[in-house]
Image (tube, helix red, strand yellow):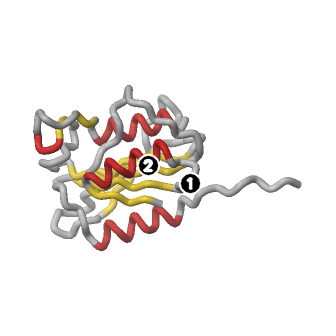
Amino acid sequence: YVIGCSNGGFMAHRLACWMDERLAAVVSVGGAGREHDEACAAVSSIAVVEVHGDADPIVRYEGGRVFGSRALDEHPSAPQTIADWAERLGCLPNAKPKITTLDLDGSLPGAETTVESHAGCVHGSAELWTVHGGGHRLATPELYAQIGTFLLNHPKPGPKKRK
């Protein structure tokens, strides 16, 4: 498993592309995946989650450049990051994601996090957790408890036993 925050979230997505045979799941908090046209060699089953605040001023939810700096490469939006994973993982192409809510940040009103889970993924799972009103720092005990539950629910499938 790999969990990365901010730049570590970018790293988690890259590791999912290149070390998927060794990883059961990756979680990126406030990072972003690769641009759609960049190579990603994921060939085995992996679960991928992007947790992102929609008010993040550093790694913008809607995509762009980190800190808005023209000196840095562009990154895709959080929804595009997970849409790309859903495509790579063979999720149902025209199915709308299942939507649930979570309360991960007591400083924000109500169940502020929307979880979009893509269905029918042949090679793993892809989820976007959008923290509405959340910024770049999303470290709450509730968030990390939910991440732990997600990881426990997504072990690496072992080799199939012969009969």
Q: Could you say which quadrant of the image residue 80 lies in?
A: top left
Q: Which residue is drawn at 16% across and 55% down?
A: 135
Which quadrant holds the C terminus?
Answer: bottom right
Q: Which quadrant of the structure image shows residue 107?
A: bottom left
Q: What residue type is labelled 2?
A: Leu
Amino acid residing under circle 1: Arg
Q: Report crowding for label 1: few under 14, some 14 to 19, many 20 or more residues within 10 A (C-alpha).
A: some
Please tell me which residue lies in front, 26 or 138. Answer: 26
Toward the viewer: 136 or 93? 136
- Occupied quadrant, residue 90: top right
Question: What mark, if any, has residue 67 been given in the picture?
Answer: none
Crowding at mark 2 (Cα within 10 Å: few <14, some 14-19, many 20+):
some
- Would you say residue 99 is visible in this rendering? no
Quick one: SS at disc 1? loop
Q: Position of residue 132 (x, y in %)?
A: 21, 52
Q: Position of residue 66 (x, y in %)?
A: 17, 43
Q: In this view, does 34 lie above or below 147?
A: above
Residue 79 is left or right of residue 41, and the answer is: left
**Tag 1 residue:** 22
- Farthest-out residue, front: 71
Question: Which residue shows up at 34% across the image and 58% down it?
Answer: 4
Residue depicted at x 46% and y 38%: 86
Which mark, by number, is residue 15? 2
The answer to whether 12 is drawn above or below residue 40 in the figure is below
* Image: 146 above or below 123: below
Q: Give the image location of residue 125, x and y in percent.
A: 50, 47
